[in-house]
Image (cartoon, rainbow, N blue to C red):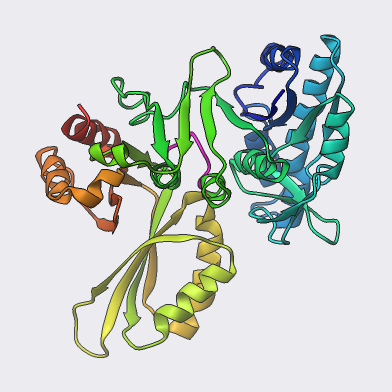
Amino acid sequence: MALIVQKYGGTSVGNPERIKNVARRVAGYRAKGDQVVVVVSAMSGVTDNLIKLANEIMPLPTEREMDMLLATGEQTTIALTAMALHALGLPAVSLTGAQAGIVTDGVHTKAKIQNITPKQVHTLLDEGKVVIVAGFQGQTQEGHITTLGRGGSDLTAIALAAALKADLCQIYTDVDGVYTADPRIVPNAKKLEEISYDEMLELASLGAKVMQSRSVEFAKKFGVVFEVRSSLNENPGTIVKEETKNMEDVVIRGVALDKNQAKVTLVAVPDKPGVAAHIFKAIGEAAINVDMIVQNISHGSGTPATDLSFTIDKPDLLKARKVIDGLKMSVGFREAIADEKIGKLSIVGVGMRSHSGVAAKMFETLAKEGVNIDMISTSEIKISVVIDLAKGEQATRALHTAFIG
């Protein structure tokens, strides 16, 4: 008998028939005597529709009320999943994130899990019930509902697997596993049998849609080995685990294109100590994550000045504009320019640590495709470039051919 945590994404529970499929899969594990905790996302499209409704009321709703609204998406799915299991004659109980003992900090829409006290989950499992937990949400110490950010159901599942000391954690999605690139962009992308936490973390944070990066980070920290697999078939998936020696033999594990980035450029920022700290402190206090940063010397006479460019997630652009408008007087830059027509293209692989010439090959490949590089960022296992979004998919295919085949 094993304790298994299974997470099902929005497409896996996208309609009543798919919810019934999930129930049948869970029933198969229960028939073998396993205890099962099921974490579910909102049904496909529900979260986007709720955001659309909120924006029709006001363009920038308060984050507390957004959490209250968005949490209802997962609560719909847990109840329906419990009903589907009841229809098969299986005892099942649905729990909100708060009822499952998930306590978070108070940062609405992007809360971090502080601790999990899964006492009630254990009690219900011991009573022979399947426990269905709403992903993506928790509750503060003061009792306020919070959400964990888009894709937060992955984090709920990994964190519960760690807290429950589960024997197995499975992340079910609409793809067979982790691929060397998005198969919708690169038709000949290959499925990986295994991938290291670090590679998965980079791919997740660089736009690969399979997993949320914070959940991979959590899995690495607590040593939760998990499998990414499809809820639509029985094919084996991709195991995400600690790095092994043979992983270094593969130079590039994957290519990722993030279309969800925006670039902000502050023109003619005074070139003096403390200015960058002042700007990025204000942006950080607004809970906006900055990714790539490039500073260029501005040409012209008079006071020394620089152009400061940085990338953020596209959904944060409206909030960032508000912060930047508030900084204009205190900092004294000339203007702020936002560009949403960019893509962040990256190659990832732990093998880059022991192989040279990777950057040169990447840049040569992009040059042959007529792709201009706007910004560059590197780590020891990845190289990312900002390019024109219109050439993003073409460039992704070219890099995949050059490095993976």
Q: Quadrant of the C terminus?
A: top left
* Percent coordinates x, y for residue 227 in the rendering: 52, 30
Q: Position of residue 359 (x, y in %)?
A: 17, 50
The boundaries of the magenta stretch are 208-213
Residue shown at the point (60%, 39%) measured from the top left = 154
Residue that appears at 30% across and 43% down: 349
Q: Nearer the viewer, residue 76 or 305?
A: 76
Q: Residue at x 66, y 36 (%)?
A: 47
What main secondary structure does the magenta stretch of the protein show? loop
In terms of image quadrants, where is residue 258?
A: top left
On screen, residue 398 versus residue 131, left or right, reads: left
| Residue 210, magenta (yes or no) | yes
Q: Is residue 91 magenta?
A: no
Q: Where the N terminus falls, by quadrant?
A: top right
In the rendered image, which quarter is residue 115 located in?
bottom right
In the figure, 380 relative to 395: above or below?
Answer: below
